[in-house]
Amino acid sequence: MNDSSWGAPPSAGLRGPGRQGTSPGYGWEVPTSSAGPAHEVGGAAQTRPMPTVPHAGGDSGEAADRDRGAARLSGPLFRDEREPQPGPRQPDGRRPTPPDPAPDPASADGAPGTGQGKKSAGRNLRAAIGVGIGLGVLILASLFIYKPVFVGVVAVAVVVGLWELTSRLTERKDIRVPLVPLAVGGVAMVVAGYVRGAQGAVVAVALTALAVLVWRMTEPPDNYLRDVTAGVFAAFYVPFLATFVALMLDTDDGPWRVLTFLLLTVVSDTGAYAVGWRFGKHPLAPRISPGKTREGLMGAVAFAMVAGALCMQYLIDDGVWWQGLLLGLAAAVSATLGDLGESMIKRDLGIKDMGKLLPGHGGIMDRLDSLLPTAPVVWLLLVIFVGGG
C-alpha cells in the first residue's frame, strides 16, 4: 500500500468525503447534517458505516459512476493495482473487465523474463527434435558404414555454411565475399585433412586464402581490403575448423573419436538448455546473448564432464575416465564460446538466425556454431591423451 491509512475502514475519528447527504467514497457512508459533519458536533454523534447501494443500468448507472469518480482519491490504493481503462459499456450498464496482461516468456536457454509467466523455449520444439533425429541418423550411418560418405557430409555442411555466412554479410553489411573460391577451397580443406592429414589441410587453407585475394581482383578496387578480410575470416571460421573433424576420422578408432566429439558438444548444449531453462537467473553475457545464464554454463560443464568420462572409458582406445573429465570441461567451455561468438556475429549483422534451412534450428551455421570451435579442442586433447592413432 502507498499509505497505511488507504483502504482501511473509517473509525469514529476519521472523516469521510464531505458531500451533502451520502457519499459513496470507498464504499462507506458517513451521515451528515445541516449543522456540519458528524465529528464536529462535540464528538457526541456516532457515525455508522453503511454499504453503498449500487445503481442499476441506464442513466442512473452513469450518474453513480460520476459520483464515485468525484469522491475517489486519485491513484490506485495499492502499488500493484492498475487503474482500469474505460471501455464500451455493456447493455446492463457495466463496463467489461480488462484482460490480464500476457506473461513475458523467457528466452530459449533459460534467462528469466521480466514478467511472471512461464518460461518458453521460443522455437518449434517438435520440428527441432525431428530435424535433430534425422541429422543424427544420417551422420551415424555415414560415420560407421563408409567413412568417405561422412567426409562428403562434412563438406556439404561446410559449403552450405559458407553460403549462409556470405549471404548474410552481403545483405546486412554489403560485404561481397567471393563464394566460389571459398566453397572450392573449403571442400579441398576437408578432403585434404582426411587424405593427407594436418599438412594437407594447412596447404589447402593457404591456397584458399590466396584464391580469395586473386578472385576479388576481378572487381573494382572499392572496399577490396574489407571484402578479402571477410573472405579469409570465413575460410578459417568454417572450413578450416571443420577440417579437424576429418583429422579425427583419419585414425584407427576415428569413428569413435568423432562420435565422442559430437556427443560432448550435443550433451553440453543439452545440459546448458535444461539447467538454464529450469534454474537460470544470472545472465552470463547479457550484452552478447541475454538468454544464456551462468547456471546454464554450469549445467553444460557438469553434463559434458560426465559424458566425457564415459566416452573416454568405453569408446576411446587406451582412454581413462579422468581424461574424459578434462575433455568434457574443455568441450563445454569451447562450445559455449563458439555459441557466444556466433551470437556476436549475428548481433553485429542484426539477425536472429543465419538461415532457415533447418526447421526449429535456423540455418546450418546455427548448428555448427558450437561444433566448429570444439573440433580442434577435442582433436588436440585426444592426441595428447591417447596419441594420433
Image (tube, rainbow, N blue to C red):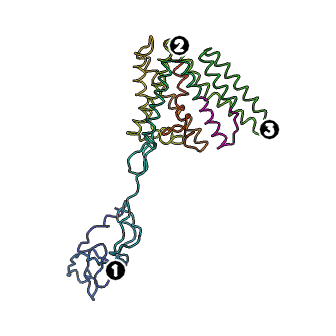
Q: Measuring 52% from the left and 14% from the top, which residue is drawn there?
A: 384
- For label 1, the SS is helix
Between disc 3 and disc 2, whose residue precedes?
A: 3
Examine the rendered structure and indicate whether residue 349 appears above or below residue 256. Answer: below
Magenta segment includes 384: no
* Residue 57 image offset from top left, x and y in percent: 32, 78
Q: Position of residue 149 (x, y in %)?
A: 55, 21
Residue for badge 2: 251
Report the predominant secondary structure element of the magenta stretch.
Answer: helix
Residue for badge 1:
58
Question: For this view, does 98 lie left or right of residue 372?
Answer: left
| Picture coordinates of residue 116, whole percent (x, y) | 38, 51
The residue that disc 3 covers is: 220
Q: Which residues are magenta?
A: 158-179
- Number of the label disc, if any, that sits on residue 120: none
Q: Is residue 328 left or right of residue 352?
A: left
Badge 3 local density, few (<14 within 10 Å), some, or many (20+)?
few
